[in-house]
């Protein structure tokens, strides 16, 4: 057994690329092939089972919301209990199991739901850890390479995505659904192996606090998350039961957290946030009491002012260090940025659902080749690989939040274009699918400006102890966007053209609010020394 201790911090003198980066990039390329290969046929698979485009849109976006909501759980487990490396490794095996279930349960809706749940848990669990883990490999001397590594990271994501989107629909047409779902599972297993091979090359930032305290942190956080997340699984039950389950999870989470605090007082984001909320209510009660005493003193003859007034208790700064309070404040500021990005993801992820639905109404013959509707989205990763260096050259000198503002405005225009295309289709026009190239170019430019920049922003602005957690919140913005799409898709009879116009308008409003918030945001870097 290799007993060589892992490095817990990056080199303070290394100025080039860290040795573990190639393993992380290789892992990410295979994992993204796995995810996008499965996603490329998911929408048409659900239609084949159920026959409803609206239902398929809803299921696809609920699945995506799960993939991007579970990162909060993975982030807490990584930061508090297992560390990023072990969290990635174990959740990757859950991911592989999900693909296996899909492959072995062809034609079964219960198998579909179970397999997608495992994939959502596995993919969601590793998502915040991988993007934070790659940043952990860099120290102060090579910190300048952080923007470049996230560009490389995003390039390999789309490299895997392109080949998966191109090949898996073809494999499905020749060999059936089971084989088409099995191949992404094989690639996920390869991804896990590549990551394991790099274990001695990585910087392993240890979890804090780890051990029993870390277990209490992770367990309480999971229950607190389930107080909201359980609603996705209890939606088919009666409202009282759904609320009861949610409240039970909330109470268990709070009790476990209090048990943890009674052992050793934590000063993380949750502890500071709950203390701040409690402090706010205490001060509110104090003011109400003082107003009541003042009213009594002025309205009654013989009353004595100040009698029985509650004494002030310790303030938040008496309970926590300045670093802990500033760290929690930093996360709140970051979340105020992420909130508006949710609408962008509501638009972007529709290239795997409503845009496929539009493509099915168009002439799919391009240069003599008959394309499949699910293959059209393959243009997105090609454009990303082309546009990353181009956008870096054109917008690299612009501040990150301004770049993201421009991207969100462009995203709105992409949906204006698909709405105009849909209006022509509804009037009986016979349009070639090549017309979709324009909105794809627009949404991909927006993706590069928003998503690539957002990864860099989320990591650099996160306090050192909360890198994975902040990445989890970044990914949660994707979940909220997809929940919005799933909810809107349930409005039976909403014409597709109106569906597109709704999201174009929402994106325009969100872009304006984002730009206003970004103007007053003061950035601060937190390198991992």
Image (cartoon, rainbow, N blue to C red):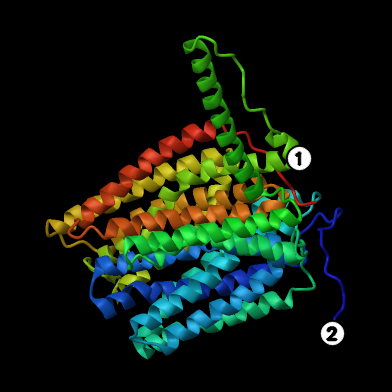
- 206 or 34, which lies in front? 206
Q: Which mark is residue 255?
A: none
**Disc 2/disc 1 C-alpha distance (Å):** 42 Å
Residue 5 pos. (x, y %): 86, 71
State the residue position of label 2: 1
Residue at x 70%, y 69% (from the top left corner) = 85
* SS category of the residue bearing label 1: loop
Can you say whether 175 is above or below 13 in the image?
below
Residue 53 pos. (x, y %): 25, 68
Residue 240 horizontal side relative to residue 54, left or right:
right
Residue 206 horizontal side relative to residue 338, left or right:
right
Residue 278 horizontal side relative to residue 63, left or right:
right
- 195 or 333, which lies in front? 333
Instruction: Specify whether residue 270 is in view.
Output: yes
Q: Residue furthest front?
A: 302
Q: Tag 1: Cα neighbours inside 10 Å, few (<14), some, or many (≥20)? A: few
State the residue position of label 1: 321
Mark found first going from the N terminus, 2 or 1: 2
């Amino acid at each position: 057994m290799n007993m060589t201790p892992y490095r817990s911090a990056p080199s303070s003198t290394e100025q080039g690329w860290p040795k573990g980066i190639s393993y992380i990039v290789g892992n990410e390329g295979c994992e993204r092939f796995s995810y996008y290969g499965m996603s490329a046929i998911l929408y048409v698979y659900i239609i084949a089972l159920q026959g409803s485009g609206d239902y398929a849109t809803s299921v696809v976006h609920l699945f995506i919301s799960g993939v991007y909501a579970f990162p909060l759980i993975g982030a807490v487990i990584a930061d508090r209990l297992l560390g990023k490396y072990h969290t990635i490794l174990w959740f990757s095996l859950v991911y592989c199991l999900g693909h296996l279930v899909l492959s072995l349960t062809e034609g079964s809706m219960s198998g579909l739901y179970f397999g997608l749940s495992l994939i959502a848990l596995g993919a969601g669990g590793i998502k915040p850890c991988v993007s934070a883990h790659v940043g952990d490999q860099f120290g102060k001397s090579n910190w300048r390479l952080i923007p470049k590594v996230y560009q490389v990271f995003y390039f390999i994501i789309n490299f895997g995505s392109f080949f998966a989107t191109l090949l898996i629909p073809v494999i499905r047409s020749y060999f059936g659904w089971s084989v088409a779902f099995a191949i992404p599972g094989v690639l996920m297993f390869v991804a896990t192996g590549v990551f394991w091979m790099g274990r001695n090359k990585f910087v392993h930032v240890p979890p804090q606090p780890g051990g029993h305290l870390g277990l209490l942190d992770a367990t309480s956080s999971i229950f607190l998350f389930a107080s909201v997340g359980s609603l996705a699984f209890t939606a088919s039950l009666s409202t009282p039961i759904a609320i009861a389950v949610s409240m039970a999870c909330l109470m268990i989470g709070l009790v476990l957290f209090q048990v943890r605090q009674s052992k050793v007082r934590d000063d993380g984001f949750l502890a500071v946030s709950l203390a701040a909320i409690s402090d706010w209510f205490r001060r509110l009660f104090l003011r109400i009491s003082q107003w009541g005493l003042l009213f009594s003193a002025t309205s009654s003859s013989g009353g004595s002012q100040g009698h029985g007034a509650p004494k002030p208790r310790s303030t938040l700064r008496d309970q926590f260090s300045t670093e802990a309070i500033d760290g929690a404040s930093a996360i709140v500021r970051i979340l105020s940025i992420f909130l508006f990005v949710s609408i962008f993801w509501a638009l972007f992820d529709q290239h795997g659902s409503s845009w496929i639905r539009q493509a099915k109404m168009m002439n799919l013959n391009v240069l003599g080749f008959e394309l499949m509707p699910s293959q059209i989205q393959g243009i997105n990763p090609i454009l990303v690989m082309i546009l990353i260096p181009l956008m870096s050259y054109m917008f690299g000198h612009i501040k990150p939040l301004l770049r993201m503002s421009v991207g969100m405005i462009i995203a709105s225009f992409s949906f204006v274009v698909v709405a105009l295309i849909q209006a022509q289709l509804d009037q009986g026009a016979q349009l070639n699918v090549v017309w979709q190239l324009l909105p794809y170019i627009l949404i991909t430019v927006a993706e590069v400006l928003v998503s690539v920049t957002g990864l860099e922003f989320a990591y650099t602005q996160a306090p050192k102890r909360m890198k994975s957690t902040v990445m989890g919140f970044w990914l949660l913005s994707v979940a909220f966007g997809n929940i919005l799409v799933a909810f809107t898709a349930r409005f039976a009879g909403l014409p597709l053209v109106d569906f597109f116009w709704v999201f174009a308008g929402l994106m325009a409003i969100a872009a304006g609010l984002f730009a206003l918030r970004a103007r007053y945001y003061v950035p601060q870097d937190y390198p991992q020394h």
